Each structure stands twice: as structure tokens, then as C-alpha cells.
Image (cartoon, rainbow, N blue to C red):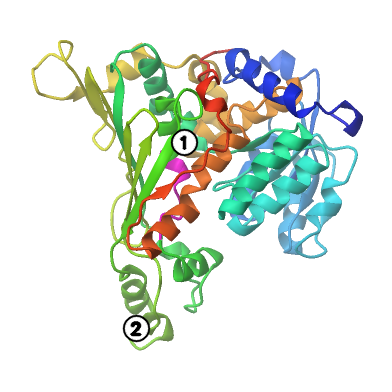
Amino acid sequence: MDRGERMTRQEFLRAGAAAGATAVLTAGTAAEEGTKPVRVGMVGVGSRGTHLLQILAGMPGVEVRAVCDIVQAHAARAQQFVEDASGARPDAYTQGDRDFERMCARDDLDAVVTATPWEWHTPVSVAAMRAGKYAATEVPAAITVEECWDLVRTSEQTGVPCMMLENVCYFRNVLALLRMVREGVLGEILHCQGGYQHDCRYLLFNADGTLTWRGRQAAAKNGNLYPTHPIGPIAWWMGVNRGDRFTQLVSMSTPAMGMRNYAAGLLGPDHEAAQRDYALGDVNTTFLKTAKGRTVVLYFDMCTPRPYDLIFRVQGTKGLYMGTFDQIYLEGVSPKKDQYEPFAPYLEKYAHPLWEDLQREAVAHGGHGGSDYITLHQFVQAVRNQTQTPQDAYDAATWSVIFPLSIESVAKGGATLDFPDFTNGKWKTNPPVAIHGA
């Protein structure tokens, strides 16, 4: 939409509620996708950005008009890829850290997608919304409380949606569980657990022992620095911002040993990287409580040797799902009392229609089991149809603010903090995430 067509704040909020009831999680047909091109600019085309760019360039009706990166070689590589895929070479913006602002000012873009280091997610998204472009950002959408409010207020003031690209919300098992929760299979949801537990020490150091941008974050901050992967699905299952909200947070961390031990093994115990102090505790545990009294436990662990595990315990009054072992137990339904059974049959029985409709394209494009494709597909559809995005600015802020709040709680010795209500009370009447197919 151009500046003259922007909705008022009240119109935007009403439209967002309507979209939640009718358009969220909808999938369009290939024919519909081909009728109205969606013109996209991409900021940050390193490794993650290149993967998203490849998906976008392969979507029917999507035109990548511009790319932006502070590394000219990355931008040139992205230009060549898009040209090879589409025959049209996008413009490149490489003139410093804030050249994305010049790109956002173009009048031939409908949306801007961001895959930069964390500290640039909010500035790029805000610039896009202020220029009248739909904003999509990699996770987390913000890393300070102030940035979270900036995202919400900018989206409200401009009437332009902002979607954090939380792909775990579109995992096949997550979507099946969403349907099961909504159909009451697990009863009333009481408690959830989740975690980003992934050995990422190799992403924190360069070969010479200097820190990557991720490593610099871990060296300076102690808390849950990557909360959105587990909290996004949990928030959908619990109806957070849509009938319930988080009200309190407590966070604690173990000592920080993993980065130093890893550096010593990689570079030797006398290397500077093995001698310095790092702030990030190896395992962070964050506790959340909701207005309805329900509880959530989040874990964050990327500095210890361990297999990847998002945990995902969903506990209801009729049974529970345990994601670590992909098993479920339903009272009076499971064949053996007090024994888990495999989740696979339920994955088929309660298959989400969105996954069924997009499975072939999603799997073909790869990326986290196909969820990357579905995530971007949902964003593109919202842009094309000028509807609210399925994950809105309130979700982006609510899920991301755990990052700075956990740091504050840890620094205060595990203090209990009040959780901001970014919806300003609208969580009481916002409709739940809808379940639709094509």
C-alpha cells in the first residue's frame, strides 16, 4: 500500500482481528500466486539470507528487485543468483550499515525481508514499515525492550504489518499439535516446556579464535538469547496474545564454561580465546506465568556438547506430548495405561491442512523440513492479499522480549519481572490463530 492508502490505527487493528479469524495460516493456489507479483527487497544475504533468497526467488509471482549487504561480494553473489533464476538482475545496496534505508525508500517494493545480525533486525523492519513496506525479519525480531515497543508502535502508527519469520511454528509436528490443542484432544493446556538446545559453539568463533557476531553477543550477555524457536509454538498452543498473555518472568543461568573449554580444545589452553571470560551461562532456564495461571519453562543451551532438542512438552488435562522422544500419552485413548505411544499416527490423523497443501513445494525447497518455505509463503500471501501477517508485531515483540528480560532477571539474581502487555489489553478479545488450508 502507498502512503495515501495506509489504514488508520483503528482500521489496522480491526483488520488484524478479521485476518486472525479468516486469513491467518491460509495457503493460496499457484494460479493465485501468479496473478499479482510481490516485489521484494532482501537485506542481509550471507548464509541464512542466501537460503531465504533462494526460496523467494523460486516462488511463483515473487520478484526480487533489490538486495542489500555491507559485504559487496555477498550482494554480487545474490544478484547473480536472482538473475540466473529469473532473468532480471536486482539492484544492490552496499554503501554502509544504513544503506537499507535507501533501499526501503524505493517506490517499487512491496516488502522487505531481513536476515542480518540480530542488532539490525529492528532498525531494518522499522525503516521498511515507515516506508509503507511489509516487514519480515529473521529471529529474534528485537534484542531490547525498547526495540520491541518500537516494532509495535511503528506497526500500529503506519498500519503496516511486521512478521517475524519464526519457522518452528510451521514444523509439521507443531502444526499437528496446534490442531489437536484446538480440537481439545489434550484437554485444557496447563503447562509447556521448550528449549533451544543446540551445540552452536562452532558458530561463535572464527578459525583464528576471534569472535563472530554471535560470539560477541554470547561474550557480553547472560540470559536466553534465542527464545523464539520454542516460545513461538508454545504461544500459539496456549493462545498467548489471543485469550491469554504472559505476566511474569524469572530467569537463571549456570556458570559460563562451555565457550572457554571449546576454545581451549580448538586452539590450545594458552590461547587468548581460552583465557578470557564469557558472560553467557552454559544453560539458562527461564520461567513464565500467564494471566490464566498457566506456566512455561524455557531452556537455552548452545555452549555444551549435546544433540539438538527443542523438547516441546505440552501438558494438558487429558494427556501430554513429549517432543524429545516424539511420543504422546492420552488418558483412556493410549493403548497402555501410563505408557507413551508413538506420535506418528497422530501426525497423520491430525495433519494440518496447510502442511498437506504445501508439503510438496515445502520439501522440495528444503530448509528445516520444509518449514522455511511455508513461513515465507505465508508472509508473501499476506503481502499479496494486503492482510495481516499470521505472526504479527505483537507476537514479534512478545516472543523476542524474553531476550532482554531474561538478561535483566539473571543480572538481578533471578528476580521476578513483570511482562509487558504489548497488545494493551487486546489479548482478551483477539481471536485465536485460525487453521486453514488452501
The magenta span reads 223-230
Image quadrant in which you'd find residue 87 = top right
Mainly helix, strand or loop, the magenta region? loop
The residue under the point 50% across, 41% down is 399
Where residue 32 sits in the image (x, y, percent)? 73, 15
| Amino acid type shown at disc 2 | Gly
- Pick whichever of labels 2 and 1 is earlier in the sequence: 1
| Amino acid type shown at disc 1 | Gly
Looking at the image, which residue sits at the far bottom?
A: 270
Report whether 109 appears left or right of 359: right
Residue sitting nearer the eye, 14 or 137: 14
User: Does 125 appear in magenta?
Assistant: no
Element under disc 2: loop
Where residue 277 sits in the image (x, y, percent)? 39, 78
Element under disc 1: helix
> Quick check: can you spot residue 423?
yes
Q: According to the image, label 1 marks what residue?
A: 232
The residue under the point 89% across, 37% down is 108
Residue 268 is labelled as 2
Q: Nearer the viewer, mark 2 or mark 1?
A: 1
Report whether 131 appears left or right of 325: right
How many neighbours does mark 1 have within 10 angstroms: few (below 14), some (14-19), or many (20 or more)? Answer: many
Report whether 229 appears left or right of 75: left
